[in-house]
Amino acid sequence: PPAVSATEVSKVYGSGDAAVHALRGVTVGFASGAFTAIMGPSGSGKSTLMHCLAGLDTVGGGRVTLGDVEITGMSDRRLTLLRRDRVGFVFQAFNLLPTLTAEQNILLPLQLAGRSPDRAWFDRVVEVVGLRDRLGHRPSELSGGQQQRVACARALVARPEVIFADEPTGNLDSASGAEVLGFLRTSVREMGQTIVMVTHDPAAASYADRVVFLRDGTIVTELYRPTPDTVL
Ligand code: ADP
Ligand code: ADP
């Protein structure tokens, strides 16, 4: 089964003349261990779809399944626990805590979940993301690219079933963005991570195995990369 899937998902904001149909019956599955990009023009429903898939927003109609759990209609409390235990997030704005070091930021989700870190896994994530000599630095002492790599390590350290990345390179220059995307791809290739990334940047999408295009709340086309290392 897919790591996460949407079946006939619709979402309307507002009502009457002011109603905005953000999603119009979207059916899509995201395979486990795949890196998928969701692209489309501004207002096409990318963020809404990601928020519905991640249980951050409720659907108007249809169903969302995360792993083997249907999250449609779940209480906020159960959704919060499910996100905490099974989902990782990377946002455009890094969202690191400024008073904590890189290491403390990376370990925070585990701490909040009351889980003890798997040291070998932590070391591997830190190594792959290239942060070994930055662990004691606070966010203000790191470049944007380094901060986003800390955020990626934080998303990965709890070994979530899926990582949702919302415009992860939106605040980065292209070199830093490439570092972050390279890390995300490595986490998919070598660690079996599942990633769903929203982006409007074709260069960012070219790191994905598959690109899903949205327009006006509908999936209009899909592309698959034929082999893992062919660039689109
Ligand atoms: P994208 O991420 O592709 O830019 P969004 O999912 O943010 O698209 O938005 C899809 C449509 O829904 C847009 O027309 C947007 O203005 C509208 N929309 C999104 N969130 C809200 C909201 N909270 N209230 C009202 N309209 C919204
Ligand atoms: P982005 O597309 O850059 O991710 P959005 O424009 O989708 O950002 O919006 C960011 C936040 O604002 C989201 O939480 C979304 O739900 C909300 N939002 C978007 N459009 C509207 C709108 N027309 N009215 C109210 N809230 C909105």
Image (cartoon, helix red, strand yellow):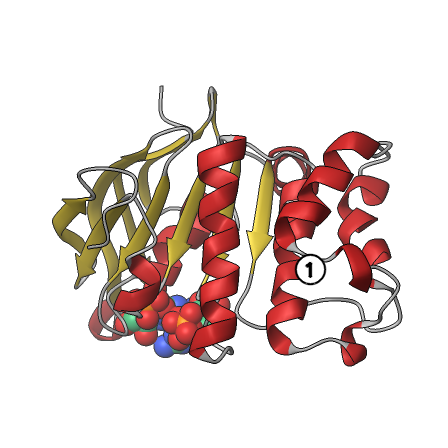
Residue 228 visible, this orientation: yes
Q: Name the quadrant containing residue 119.
A: top right
Locate the C terminus by quadrant: bottom left
Q: Can you say whether 146 is above or below 157 in the image?
A: below
The residue depicted at 72 percent of the width and 48 percent of the height is 126
**Is the residue marked by circle 1 packed among few (<14), some (14-19), or many (20+) residues within 10 Å?**
many
Q: Can you say whether 37 is above or below 102 in the image?
A: above
The residue depicted at 47 percent of the width and 25 percent of the height is 67
Percent position (x, y) of residue 166? Answer: 46, 61
The residue depicted at 50 percent of the width and 77 percent of the height is 172
Q: Nearer the viewer, residue 68 or 93?
A: 93
Horizontally, residue 137 falls left or right of residue 10, namely: right
Residue 72 visible, this orientation: no
Locate the N terminus by quadrant: top left
Q: Nearer the viewer, residue 33 or 84?
A: 33
Q: Can you say whether 220 is above or below 175 in the image?
A: above
SS class of the residue under badge 1?
helix
Q: Name the quadrant containing residue 116.
A: top right
Q: Nearer the viewer, residue 190 or 209?
A: 190
Horizontally, residue 176 falls left or right of residue 135, namely: left
Q: Can you say whether 103 is above or below 124 in the image?
A: below
Residue at the left extreme, as displayed = 220
Quadrant containing ligand 2: bottom left
The residue at which mark 1 appears reads as 150
Percent position (x, y) of residue 10? Answer: 27, 48
Percent position (x, y) of residue 2? Answer: 36, 26
Q: Amino acid at mark 1?
A: Val
Percent position (x, y) of residue 219? Answer: 16, 51
